Amino acid sequence: MKIDRQCVVSEPKSTASEYFSEQCALFSELADRATLISYKIGRRMANQRAVMASWIFMRTCITAKSIELLFKPIPSGYGNASYLDHASIAALCRCLIESVTVLLYLGDDTVSEDEWECRRCLIDLHDFRSREEFLSLIGAPAPKENPADTHKMLQDRLENNPFFKTPRLVGGIQQSS
C-alpha cells in the first residue's frame, strides 16, 4: 500500500471484508494524525479566526473518532452474525463533511478581514436561527432575552458589514447585497 499527497493508492483486495478493513485502517490513521495535529496546535491561538478554526478542527477530530468506533461490528447474539451500524456511520460522515466545509469557509486566511467578519456574522445569524427553531420544536421554555431583538441585532450586524454591502460580479452579472 502506498499513500501519496494527492490520494490514497492501494492494491485491490480479494474480498469486500479485506477492502473494508484496509479502508478502516486508513481512516483511523488519518483520524489519529488529525487528532495529533489538533493537540499540537490547540494551544496556539493568535486571533479569533484561528480560535474558531481550531475549535471546528477539534470537532472534526471528535467526529472522526466516533466514526472509527462504529467500524467495529456489533455481535448480534446469533452465532457469528454481527451488525455494522451503517446509518450512524453515514450520518456522522455527513457531519464530518459539513464540519470540514465550515472549517474551510471560516479558516480561509486568504480573505480580507471584512469578508471574514461577514462570514462570521452569517454563521452567527444562521446558528441563532437554527437554535431558535430547534428549541421551539422541542417546546423549550422561551429565553429571558427577546429572541426578536437578538435576531435583529445579528441581522443588522451582517447588513452593516462593509463586505456584505459591496456589490460583486457573479457570473459576469453585478449582484447587490
Image: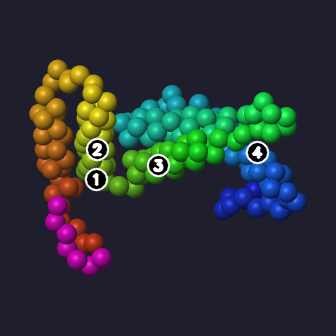
Q: Earlier in the sequence, mark 4 or mark 3?
A: 4
The stretch of residues the image draws in magenta is 171-177
Residue ranking furthest to the right: 14
- Is residue 38 at least partly visible in the picture? no
Viewer-nearest residue: 172 or 149: 149
Residue 62 pos. (x, y %) = 57, 34
Query: Closer to us: mark 1 or mark 3?
Result: 3
- Assess disc 3: are there few (<14), some (14-19) or many (≥20) residues with their C-alpha within 10 Å of its C-alpha: few
Picture disc at residue 90 = none
Element type at marker 4?
helix
Element type at marker 2?
helix
Mark pair 2, 1: CA separation: 16 Å
* Residue found at x 20% / y 24%: 142
Mark pair 4, 3: CA separation: 22 Å
Query: Closer to us: mark 4 or mark 1?
Result: 4
- Is residue 172 at least partly visible in the picture? yes
- Name the kind of residue labelled 3 in the image: Glu
Mark pair 1, 3: CA separation: 20 Å
- Name the kind of residue labelled 1 in the image: Glu
Residue at numbered disc 2? 126
Picture disc at residue 98 = 3
Element type at marker 3?
helix
Q: Earlier in the sequence, mark 2 or mark 1?
A: 1
Q: Earlier in the sequence, mark 2 or mark 3?
A: 3
Residue at numbered disc 4? 25
Residue 151 pos. (x, y %) = 17, 38
- Assess disc 2: are there few (<14), some (14-19) or many (≥20) residues with their C-alpha within 10 Å of its C-alpha: some
* Residue found at x 42% / y 48%: 102
- Name the kind of residue labelled 4 in the image: Ala
Q: Earlier in the sequence, mark 4 or mark 2?
A: 4
